[in-house]
Image (cartoon, rainbow, N blue to C red):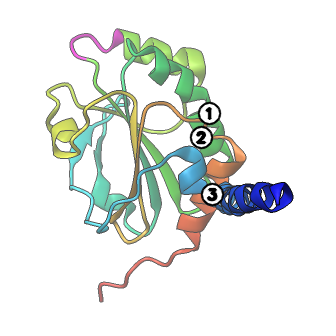
């Protein structure tokens, strides 16, 4: 009698535990879940922009149609942003020969000296864009720094990651590989 009561209690617990383990293992396969990247319910087109770059040029998001874009909003005064940058540079170094680009949009205002010094000191080789008035941050509804948007080859937002991430880890690479595998929509 007591054995049946114990079994009646333990069996449901075992079933719930097994289900939780299965869900956790599935989550381990999903790079969005592992990285805690928020997927949009509807993949809307990424808001268009043109921004000046630190090297003196102008960069248009539309120029990267057909590529996966990792759009990172950051600032030199933001400690988590500074800590995240080496992983972005490492990812960029490994994927730069593929249809992939990292665009780092700084929220720094005033003198560009701290931005230039940071970029030089850390050997950042991807485009650094200037959004001193915050217009692009507002269009992307950036409410904290760092914040990263992943834009698919079709120009639509595939995910948003508020807070710093390890963009050089295996989950980030799986996520970028997934996005690279998706074909860009043809517009002709």
Tell which circle, 2 or 1, labels the residue nearer the N-terminal end: 1
Residue drawn where x is 66% and y is 37% of the image? 90
Image location (x, y in percent) of residue 186: 36, 85
Image location (x, y in percent) of residue 91: 63, 43
Relative to 15, say whether 147 is above or below: above
Is disc 1 surrounded by few (<14), some (14 to 19) or many (20+) residues within 10 Å? some
Tell which circle, 3 or 2, labels the residue nearer the N-terminal end: 3
Relative to 117, say whether 31 is above or below: below
**Which residue is the site of mark 3?**
27
Distance of label 2 from label 1 (alpha carbons)? 5 Å
- In the image, 50 versus 161, the foreground residue is 161
| Residue 180 included in the magenta stretch of the image | no
* Direction front: furthest residue: 1
Mark linked to residue 87: 1
Please tell me whether mark 3 or mark 1 is closer to you in this view. 3
Image location (x, y in percent) of residue 8: 73, 62
Distance of label 3 from label 2 (alpha carbons)? 18 Å
- In the image, 166 versus 23, the foreground residue is 23
**Which residue is the site of mark 2?**
167
Mark 2–mark 1 CB contact (< 8 Å): yes
Residue drawn where x is 79% and y is 60% of the image? 7
């Amino acid at each position: 009698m007591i054995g049946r009561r114990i079994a009646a209690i333990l069996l449901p617990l075992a079933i719930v535990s097994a289900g939780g383990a299965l869900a956790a293992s599935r989550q381990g396969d999903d790079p969005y879940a592992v990285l805690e990247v928020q997927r949009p319910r509807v993949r809307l087109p990424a808001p268009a922009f043109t921004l000046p770059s630190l090297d003196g040029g102008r960069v248009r998001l539309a120029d990267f149609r057909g590529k996966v874009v990792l759009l990172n909003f950051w600032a030199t005064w933001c400690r988590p942003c500074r800590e995240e940058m080496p992983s972005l540079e490492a990812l960029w170094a490994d994927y730069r020969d593929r249809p992939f680009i990292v665009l780092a949009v700084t929220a720094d205002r005033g003198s560009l000296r701290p931005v230039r010094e940071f970029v030089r000191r850390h050997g950042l080789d991807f485009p650094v864009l200037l959004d001193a008035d915050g217009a692009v941050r507002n269009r992307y509804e950036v409410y904290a720094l760092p914040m990263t948007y992943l834009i698919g080859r079709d120009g639509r937002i595939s995910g948003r990651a508020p807070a710093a991430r390890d963009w050089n880890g295996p989950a980030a690479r799986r996520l970028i590989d997934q996005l690279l595998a998706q074909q860009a929509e043809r517009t002709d």
